[in-house]
Image (cartoon, coloured by chain):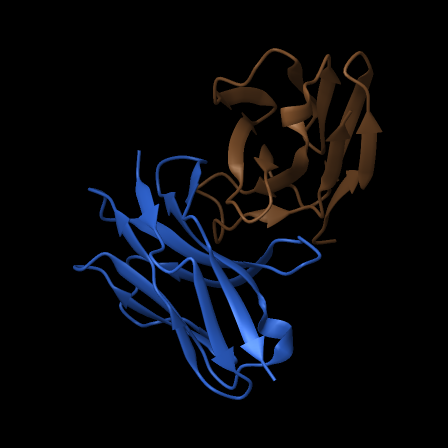
Chain colours: A brown, B blue
Amino acid sequence: DTEVTQTPKHLVMGMTNKKSLKCEQHMGHRAMYWYKQKAKKPPELMFVYSYEKLSINESVPSRFSPECPNSSLLNLHLHALQPEDSALYLCASSQPIRGVRGKLFFGSGTQLSVL
Amino acid sequence: AQTVTQSQPEMSVQEAETVTLSCTYDTSESDYYLFWYKQPPSRQMILVIRQEAYKQQNATENRFSVNFQKAAKSFSLKISDSQLGDAAMYFCAYRSNTGNQFYFGTGTSLTVIP
């Protein structure tokens, strides 16, 4: 199994809603990532978990709250979002750098629209 | 932080021809990884090719090859026999050998002309 699975694929939410994005991988990777991507732009790093601990938080607003319940799962909890938060949210995983190959595996993303 | 520069926002190529996408990076490290990722209209990010800095030999994957010039900090991607399915955004990325962070370039949008 060489996949990163993200759900849902599309999400429309109002500014007062609470929703969660989910990500799962069964490759044994111990680093998991959330990226935000606008059209025609590179992915912007939001959070990195390494061995289930938050290791990088790129000054993301508190309306985004990550959670890593175990080594296979990564969630992104959303609350009181703004229209400018509309974007593609990508989950990714990799081996920590001392592991093999070092590449980043991406999920297919959640296209989020905030109304 | 490392910086990755892609100086060509848009490129086009005739079907069956060859195109080269440019990437330069800035680092003081000697050991690192470099990647090219492809993002077609589906927006799925797909790894095209990977290069380890300690390897002098340029990586190749079928029609895709790189020209890795370590001293010049250059990592270009050559696509041979271009196909319509190669049309996509291409992102160059850098990963240090000492951390989990990846640094992406701004991307090159490739159009393939039939």
Residue A30 visible in this rendered orientation of the protein: no
- Residue at the left extreme? B71
Residue drawn at (66%, 53%) of the image: B43
Q: Nearer the viewer, residue B49 or B38?
A: B38
Residue drawn at (60%, 49%) of the image: A105
- Asked which quadrant contains residue B20, the reply is bottom left
- Is A37 on the left or on the right of B10, as rendered? right
- Is A54 on the left or on the right of A75, as rendered? left
Q: Position of residue B109 (x, y in %)?
A: 51, 61
The vertical placement of A113 against B74, above or below, is above
Task: Name the quarter where the C terminus of chain A is drawn.
Answer: top right
Residue drawn at (57%, 20%) of the image: A53
Q: Position of residue B100 (x, y in %)?
A: 45, 36
Q: Position of residue B107 (x, y in %)?
A: 46, 53
- Is A92 on the left or on the right of A19, as rendered? left
Residue B43 visible in this rendered orientation of the protein: yes
Q: Position of residue B72 (x, y in %)?
A: 18, 60
